[in-house]
Amino acid sequence: MTQFKGYRCSLCQTDFDPVSIIYTCPKCGGNLDVLLDYEKIREKYRAEDLLSRSEDSLWKYLPLLPLSDPGGFNTPFRLSGWTPLYSPPILKKSLGLAELWIKDEGKNPTASFKDRASAIVVARAREINAEIVVTASTGNAGAALAGMAAAIGQKCIIFAPKTAPPAKVAQLLVYGAQVILVDGNYDSAFDLTIEASKEFGWYCRNTGFNPFTAEGKKTAAFEIWEQVLVNLPAGSKPLCVFVSVGDGNIISGIHKGFLDLQRLGWLKQMPRLFGIQAEKSAAIANAYFDKTETITPVAATTLADSISVDLPRDGVRAVRAARDTGGEYITVPDDQIISSIGELGKYGIFTEPAGATAFAGLRKALAENVVNGDDPVLVINTGNGLKDIRAAMMAVTAAPVIEPTMVSLKNHLKV
Amino acid sequence: MTQFKGYRCSLCQTDFDPVSIIYTCPKCGGNLDVLLDYEKIREKYRAEDLLSRSEDSLWKYLPLLPLSDPGGFNTPFRLSGWTPLYSPPILKKSLGLAELWIKDEGKNPTASFKDRASAIVVARAREINAEIVVTASTGNAGAALAGMAAAIGQKCIIFAPKTAPPAKVAQLLVYGAQVILVDGNYDSAFDLTIEASKEFGWYCRNTGFNPFTAEGKKTAAFEIWEQVLVNLPAGSKPLCVFVSVGDGNIISGIHKGFLDLQRLGWLKQMPRLFGIQAEKSAAIANAYFDKTETITPVAATTLADSISVDLPRDGVRAVRAARDTGGEYITVPDDQIISSIGELGKYGIFTEPAGATAFAGLRKALAENVVNGDDPVLVINTGNGLKDIRAAMMAVTAAPVIEPTMVSLKNHLKV
């Protein structure tokens, strides 16, 4: 664990030692960045050493994580990350792009990007001998924590609003998590987990609160580096990465991963990060457009539930991720999110609404010449479409019904 | 395509040439086995050559398939198969097994075992220049065909009974399949696809009808060979493979894969195949118990919808798969299927009911000493639990609701 040097507050820049178990900045409340000992890593590893490690999961990047090896071999815990890239030729051509990749996070063990964060937090919990990991969640983050914890026998408790969809709660319960529903909204569940973790010494996973969630999410940047960046021809324009944004933690984590590589001297060119928000949940995009780091909460109503967020918990770093990389924020209406599910489906890629949001953002960026045909583009699908069948049903038109006879079939086919 | 020699009827043993596009035996209606030119394969490849091919999908076994390379790189089509094995230490210990693996077919592109068959049938369709692939399905097979076809731009039509769950139909539609609902049951949809494929020259994927579905499913046997069998110590008892059985095509396909390896001289020891059926859908098990190859239809009512089958279309070969390998048939009640979902979930493995069925069968086999602690065991999870959230909800007990206050929490936790 020698490469873990401590934390630095993203707002007031105060440093904290690695021994304390802290979450947001004790001084100003800002999100904490994990500091690594880049010198030590560089002494021990060359970029080629990382690239040649053979494990097909995020654990191949262990030397760049603030953790010792957590074990968990031969379980789903060990299989988060190293998600595939698709590059459908027809889609690429129809968009007029020379290079297009879709990174499918729906292939993670519990079928969303959140497995990356949960795997790292559960590993951290094991390292600090936390008896219980707790989180507030109604969706993917909870499922990811429940799944990753179950895989290595870590006890966890998940607080969800009592209005959470029974199907999502069932997934948490199947994984054996202790689930407590609260008679309130997500924010009241969030606050209760923080209070309870303080009082009972539970380890709190909450996104945008625990600094290790971004450390998990940064592993997607390492994979993009290995799967795409090291193979881009010299003189190529920078890669444009499109990712949906809710609380801001995924784009912040990906930015952190690229920054780690840059500090190690292993990154030829920083990718441009494009944060895509639903118009009906655009608190971070609003701040970006207003050129401020003050995040004003909204009353989010988008159908893309994974990115429907009133008060983003990682807004400032998320604004910076686009601003500091020459990216952009883009907002898209719900109807384009839904139609993007159907569009990607036609290439065999089944996405949840938050995943389709990133693609809808790409479409808008192309239409407005924010990116062009010679910009290499990577779109992140954050979750499997099976996570939200209700949205899938909105994306399609009903199938016809016929009598089970050849006469009816021929009438229907007009042959 | 030189290794594809033709077909042999599993009932009347008549051989057919590889040029004809045939389904079941034109003489007696029996299921057809695909014949390979084992001599030619052996001349060209050693077992080690197959094991050292680096593609992480079923396509690494292309030299053992009756197909030329279908392409489809960088799409989900190319990612079927090469599913992971789990070996949860605590579960292994609690069952008293020295060796236990769970092969997770839920990690396939459309989240079920059926992707193997659909990938191969779609590749075959491309080879014979079929304009349209058609199938009858209400569930995983249809989703797999729709997903695999979409990934490489193959047109497909899916017939489903109009009573099919709207969520499952939505998945087909998202993948861009032409879906036609029929005012009848699965069997009427099945019959209509066969009639339509005859009249319109469509290529019919129907399971237990098209001989290429078993060729796809056999690739799971090749993976078990590579992931487990070649590493079993000398003198080990034969591997016991537990798999759920509905229409009988998966167990038949796996048997075919092991037979291929045996004929090549690459298999040290034939695994024992254990077919697990739901008590409420046990047509094949009934025949097995009655020591007959005459399959008598039942009125299937099990909750495990992927294996709820009145009239199994691949029953004879399925009976033989267990009988000829020293395996067994085992039936389990629905309540044990449902409770097995919860049991596997506690190890981070989320299964659909048909997947949990195989595990319930293992439990019964251990209780009745059909297998013992020193038998190496592999259980196949045929699909992801997200495929059937309704069943997951039955596997768990409801979560408590509290006020979002520390007082309520402490009352609830009794601390």
Image: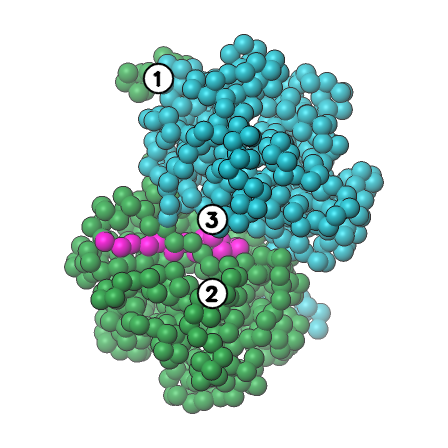
Chain colours: A green, B cyan
Mark 1 or 2, closer to the camera: 2
Mark 3 or 1, closer to the camera: 3
In this picture, is A68 found above or below B311?
below
Q: Residues within 10 Å of mark 3 (few under 14, many from 20)?
A: few
> Mark 3 highlights which residue?
B55
Image coords of residue B124 (percent x, y): 42, 30
Q: Amino acid at mark 2?
A: Ser
Q: Earlier in the sequence, mark 3 or mark 1?
A: 3
SS assignment at label 3: loop
Q: In whole angstroms, how far apart are the C-alphas of marks 3 and 1?
A: 37 Å
- Contact check, label 1 and label 2, Cβ < 8 Å: no
Find the magenta span and give its range: A98-111
In this picture, is A195 found above or below B161?
below
The chain to which mark 3 is attached is B
Query: How many numbered circles are shown?
Result: 3
Image coords of residue A86 (percent x, y): 37, 50
Both labels 3 and 1 in a single chain: yes
Q: Amino acid at mark 1?
A: Phe
The chain to which mark 2 is attached is A
Q: Residues within 10 Å of mark 1 (few under 14, many from 20)?
A: few
Q: Could you say which is closer to the camera, residue A233 or residue A186? A: A233
- Residue lying at 54% horizontally and 16% vertically, measured from the top left: B15
Residue A19 counted in the magenta span: no
- Residue lying at 54% horizontally and 58% vertically, measured from the top left: A79
Q: Which mark is residue A52?
A: 2
- Residue lying at 28% horizontally and 18% vertically, measured from the top left: A414
